[in-house]
Image: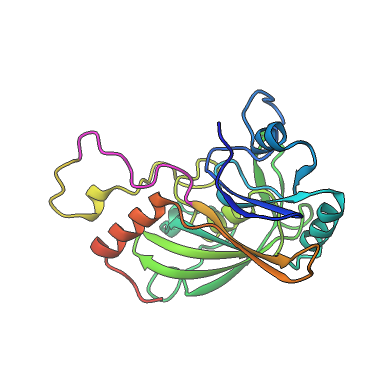
Amino acid sequence: MPLPPVLHEDEALLAFDKPSGLLVAPDRWDKTRENLMGLVHARLGYGVANVHRLDADTSGVLLCARGKAALDFLSGQFQAKTVEKTYHAIVVVLAPEQAMKVIAPVRDAAGGLPAEFTVDLALGEDERQRGRMRVFKGRGGKPSTTAFRVLESFGRFAFVECRPITGRTHQLRLHLAAAGAPVLNDRFYGAPEIQLLLSDLKRGYKGREGEKPLVARLGLHASRLVLTHPSTREKVVLSAPLPHEFEVALKYLRKFSRRRPT
């Protein structure tokens, strides 16, 4: 497999547009699975190291450092929470009775998602399900906070900007699920039986037989990182364009869904 598209490259930084489905580092349980850093080390050597991680099914900006000094400087920014991280998600707005029972679903007066909301729930490993996380109420887990802004609402679906304050595993997916709006196609925490189909949006659609969903992957994308460059000490903005599937899905949602004001 070739390396993913390079978003930025200089003497200290290397940023990729990681595709959905590709692990960042070797899997804890299956070492044979292909991963981004294995590809990077095979082509560029072991002087390149990933600064952070994305879920395998999440696409978008993945930052690497060239050399230990750059790695230490960048890692310090992530630990100090000074890196600005922006994700975009297509979510399923569930009815209250369908939503995760951790907290009451977040809703506005009309039953949709409010224009802005914050989820502050502690997260930790789920001891009962390997590879998954869960919400901790009371003791346990690590403090986790995410700010959300609804960019567009389409009734059953919405397009949401996510700004994680902390960086826990599966944080955005769990926080959105807890708010009653899980990420589209989230098989761990969402409602994977709900698909985004053109036939459900467009009246008189005649291609139902053999129809494929507009988005077949996890509806979560790491769009932007803003950080300080380890050499120049200047601000660097790293951006990854929305995946083509997202663009197509949003085009049809805008055209055929009843949009709600945000």
Please identify the dominant SS of the magenta region: loop
Q: Which residue is at the far front?
A: 11
- The segment highlighted magenta reads 208-219
Residue 191 position within the rendered picture, expressed as x and y whole percent measured from the top left: 45, 46
Question: Which quarter of the figure has residue 39?
Answer: top right
Question: Which quarter of the figure has residue 129?
Answer: top right
Residue 148 position within the rendered picture, expressed as x and y whole percent measured from the top left: 55, 68
- Residue 138 visible in this rendered orientation of the protein: yes
* Colour setting: rainbow
Q: Is residue 41 or residue 98 the one in the foreground? A: 41
Q: Is residue 98 left or right of residue 28?
A: left
**Which quarter shows the N terminus?**
top right
Q: Which residue is at the far top?
A: 32
Residue 133 position within the rendered picture, expressed as x and y whole percent measured from the top left: 66, 45
**Which quarter shows the C terminus?**
bottom left
> Within the magenta stretch, is there residue 205?
no
Q: Residue at x 77, y 60 (%)?
A: 78
- Residue 164 visible in this rendered orientation of the protein: no
Q: Is residue 118 or residue 73 the one in the foreground? A: 73
Q: Residue at x 46, y 56 (%)?
A: 242
Q: Is residue 161 left or right of residue 145?
A: left
Residue 223 position within the rendered picture, expressed as x and y whole percent measured from the top left: 55, 59
Q: Residue at x 28, y 58 (%)?
A: 252
- Above/below status of 75 relative to 261: above
Q: Residue at x 49, y 47 (%)?
A: 190
Q: Give the total number of marks visible in the rendering.
A: 0
Q: Is residue 240 left or right of residue 155?
A: right
Q: Is residue 130 left or right of residue 114?
A: right
Q: Is residue 239 or residue 2 the one in the foreground? A: 2
- Above/below status of 16 relative to 143: above
Question: Which quarter of the figure has residue 158?
Answer: bottom left
